[in-house]
Structure formats: structure tokens, C-alpha cells
Image (spheres, grey):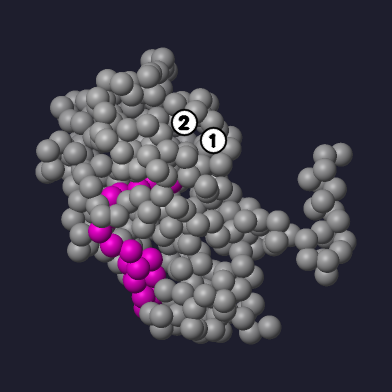
Amino acid sequence: MRPSTLASIACLALPLLGCGDDKVDFFQPVTKDPGFPGTAGDPDAYQSLFRYTPNPSCAPDVIRKLERRTEIRIFRGYGITPDMTARFVAGLKRYYDYYGVTMYTRHDVIEVPLDHAMVMNSSAISDWMSKNTNVSPNCLAGYGSVDCERAMGGAMFYNVKQFLSTYAEPAQDLINVVLLKRVVALDPDDDDSELAWGVAGLGFSEDLLNSVGGSDIGTTSLADIMDESNFSPTVFISVNLTDFLLKEPDVVIAHEFGHAYGLEHDQWDEGNLMYPTVNRCDQSLDSSQLSTIEQATAKYGNSLLATHDDPLAFLSFEDRAGEILDIVRQRVAQVGAR
Ligand SMILES: [Zn+2]
């Protein structure tokens, strides 16, 4: 029996000893690496990061090729090796090369002290709200005030906000890629575990105008809950889950980039890259999606569209943001009421 199994049995048997929550480092501050922002180098010097072996069996349908480039900046969290990083970044390039969008970087990979991007443990969120804000977690019963919702967002998205304020603000014409072991922290509430494990990617951008879930979820917008502005689009990828799901990471990271370029989900075509779940390795982009990417990449000198006054979008599952926030809201209110 592995030690982790033993530990979880002990936790089940002895809940009053407090094992469980305190073992997960939920809220992880991010301080700036001395190498950031650094001097931009020659993209050729970083080409080895993007080297891939062609995989013709996963080639998407290509209606037309764009002649575009996109600059990215690459970050890796705890437990993500340089090899894993290169494999994911190469998968991103392999996918978009089919469509004539060239990915490049002018900087070294930066390590970030993160295990995950978001927290779905209601006790941890409740505790954080009590210690760090002026509002009581009870305020989440029903829909809370903006201050109340923002306090919850401050906990749920603590790591995301730490990353954005340290590395993504003010916005630049590039996309940040943050490779982490997982998107949602270990130890979510029991009945959320399936939801939490199913999150392969999470993207934040100010570009995706009037997105399905970003602008109107309950009484408070996600923009209000996140309370961040003027940042570069940033994509968080769960390396563990992606590797569990797929032989190659290409479509997961390419899907998140689709959101970063402003694409919403395509709910109907299972063969489309923007279908909400991954089921094939050759999911494709259609003609109108290619036009969107063409515009997004052209507007700022072949790099990314970055406007600052638009609503935030919950990219990887914008159609589920309302659902997830509702669940967490109710749970935290219950914890607060105890
Ligand atoms: Zn998505």
C-alpha cells in the first residue's frame, strides 16, 4: 500500500485530527523572478523549445493558412520539468503551424512557485475570506454584494491574481502560457472532485467580448469578481490531466489559445477545436474562426489583440463559470454559517 493511501485512510478515520486541508498549500504568493522582464533575445535562440516531430495522423483539416506570428512567454510551476515544458510548447507550435500561425518567444522559461491556479475547497475559501477581508463568508448566501463576491474571488483565484499582477500587468502584445501540475488545487469539496479534475485548462483574457459566461453570471460579473485589468491574455494548463487524456497535448493547449485569440466554444461540431471537450487529436478550425485569429494577430503588429476595457472571460469553460461559482458560493456560505 502506498503511503498516500494510508494517509487518506487515516484522515477518514480521524477527521478531528485535522489532516486534509492543512496539507494542501492552497494560497501561493508569486514574487517576481529577477530575470523578469529581462532583455528580449533573438527568437532563433529559443527555437529548440519548439522543436517537434510531425504527427500526420493528428493533422487537422486546413481550409486556409494565415501568415501570422504570435509571441508567447512561458512559465512552469512546481513539478513541471524542462522536458514537459518543451513537449507542451512544441505541441502548441505543431498545431498552429498547420494554419500558418508561428509561435515564438524571446525569453527563457521562468519558474513560478505554483502547484495550481484555483481553489475549490470551501473551508479554505471561507477561512481566507475571514482572515483577509472585511466581509463574512455568510454574505455568500444567495448572491452577495460586489465586495462579498470579490472576497470569494480573491480566495478562489488567489494564485491566478498573484500571477497576473506579477507577470501579466500591464498588458503586452503577447500571450502567457503557465504550465502547472493541475488547474484546480487538490482537496476540492468531495462532490466537486469530478468537476475539479476535469479542468484541463483555464484562460483569462480581456479580449473575448461579451463572452457567454464572462459578462453575466448571476448578479456580479466575472470581471468584478476577478478585479484585475490591463493584463496580457494568460493561459493555465493542467499538464497532469492533459497527459492523462491524450498522447499529445496539442489540442488542449491549442484550444486555450483559441480562447486567448477571442474564440468562444463551438457546442455543435465535435470535430472543431473549440468544442468544449477534447475527443480527437485532429480537431480543426473553421473559416470564421481563422478570420478571428487573423484579425487578432494582425491588429498589433502580428501579435495579440489587447484592449483594456472589455469584460473578462473565463476561457476554458466560459459556459460553466456561472455553475462553478454558484456551487462554491453556496458551499462557502454553508461553511461560514457553521
Ligand atoms: Zn474552452
Question: What residue do we see at 27% from left, 35% from top?
Answer: 39
Q: Is residue 166 left or right of residue 69?
A: right
**Label 1 crowd (10 A; few <14 / some 14-19 / many >=20):** some
User: Among all residues in the image, which is located at the extreme front?
Assistant: 34
- Please tell me in which quadrant of the rendered image residue 48 appears: top left
Q: Do the residues bearing badges 2 and 1 touch, measured as CB atoms within 8 Å? A: yes
Percent of width and height locating residue 280: 45, 31
Can residue 264 be seen? no
Q: Is residue 230 magenta?
A: yes
Question: The C terminus lies in which quarter of the figure?
Answer: bottom right
Residue designated by label 2: 85
Q: Report the side of 244 relative to 165 (left or right).
A: right
Using the image, determine if residue 105 lies above or below residue 29: above
**Cα–Cα span, label 2 and label 1:** 7 Å
Image quadrant in which you'd find residue 297: top left
Q: Mark 1: which amino acid?
A: Ile
Question: Sequence-wise, which precedes: disc 2 or disc 1?
Answer: 1
Q: Which residue is mark 1?
A: 80
Q: Secondary structure at mark 1?
A: loop
Q: Residue 37: image x %, image y %? A: 31, 43
- Residue 113 image position (x, y, % from top left): 52, 47
**Where are the magenta residues, as a range?**
218-238
Q: Quadrant of the N terminus?
A: top right
